[in-house]
Image (spheres, grey):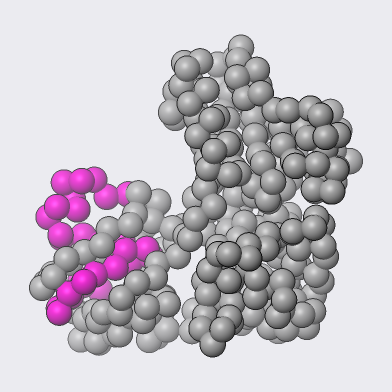
Amino acid sequence: MSESQHGALRLRVKRIEAVTPEINRYTFGAADGSWLPPFSGGSHITVLIPADGETRRNAYSLMSSPYDTSEYQIAVRRVDDGKRGSLAMHTNVREGDVLLAGIPANLFPVSKHARHHLFIAGGVGITPVFAQLEELSLKGSSFELHLAVRGPAHAALGHELQERYGERVTLYGHDGQSRLNTMDVLAGRPLGTHAYVCGPTRMIDDVVNSAHVLGWSDSNIHFERFEDLGSTGNPFSVTLARSGAVIEVSPEQSLLEAVEEAGHKLPYLCRGGACGECETEVLELDGTIDHRDDWLSESDRETCKLIMPCVSRATCTKLVLNA
């Protein structure tokens, strides 16, 4: 297993490839040459990027094969007017550099109950689909992909997938003419079909709204937005009741990461606030909890007796956990 530093993986940049005018693909290996932690299709890692004297924490989907953990691959779209993390990746990171990254987390897994998997993606939203299709293909599952791009110069990743999966992959916009119509793609699907969408917010909203119009159940619609999946904010301190340890949580790390950096352990699985594995009892609180998870009910949140350390934070003068 790969070596880690304060709970983070040390990844060496093996290759950098320009796949579109805006997107670079980065291939990482463990800095010590060992195997990397396993992951499933739809997983992401949070990369710690030095930029302008600070550290940016950007989440990127893993697009390499889940069945080969000798390396990880991500694709980074350059955003010149964003938080400068992607710009720093494009301008400052070179082959041979070592970057820190979090352990893979998955908030966008494929459904185990689907009879058919229908993927709709746009632009760099294709990245999680790479690993998802690889996983489904090796399992012999039924799937298809509809990918929209902005023109021939942006179609390289789509052409790669067409070479692998043939007619199961349909491209739109690669010829400068064809357009994706989500109503047409979603209409008339048999029971047991699950839809997955990843791309710009407008595309996600269009697919979800079209699916609702056609009578799709929310349980059969899955999506992932390009947002910061980390847990950053104001610093605070936490006390672990069982050991008495007082731990400072910095603005650039989650509560879970701070506990791990201090040499203590908390249970976790997804590291994204979705699975419930890290649910921890709050024994004392002077202040408020900033709940950012998708696990706790509203009534649980109102009691302030539970927290999900992987994503949630606190604004407080005192926080004591049963850990």
| Residue 303 is covered by the magenta coloring | yes
Q: Give whichever of 42, 180 is nearer the camera.
A: 180
- The residue depicted at 31 percent of the width and 75 percent of the height is 234
Is any atom of residue 290 visible in this view? Answer: yes
Q: Where is residue 125 in the image (x, y as percent from the top left)?
A: 64, 47
Q: Is residue 162 left or right of residue 46?
A: right
263 horizontally vs 242: left or right = right
Q: Which residue is drawn at 89% across and 41% down?
A: 163
Pinpoint residue 35: horizontal percent, then vertical percent. 70, 72
Residue 31: image quadrant is: bottom right
Q: Quadrant of residue 135?
A: top right
Residue at the location (27% across, 50% down)?
Answer: 296
Total residue callouts: 0
Q: Residue extending furthest top?
A: 188
Residue 216 horizontal/vertical position (percent)? 48, 20
At 54% from the left and 38% from the top, the residue drawn is: 202
Identity of the residue furthest to the front in this view: 81
**Screen quadrant of the C terminus:** bottom left
- Locate residue 67: give its quadrant: bottom right
Magenta stretch containing residue 159, yes or no? no
- Magenta segment: 295-323
Q: Which of 83 and 253 is in front in this view?
A: 83
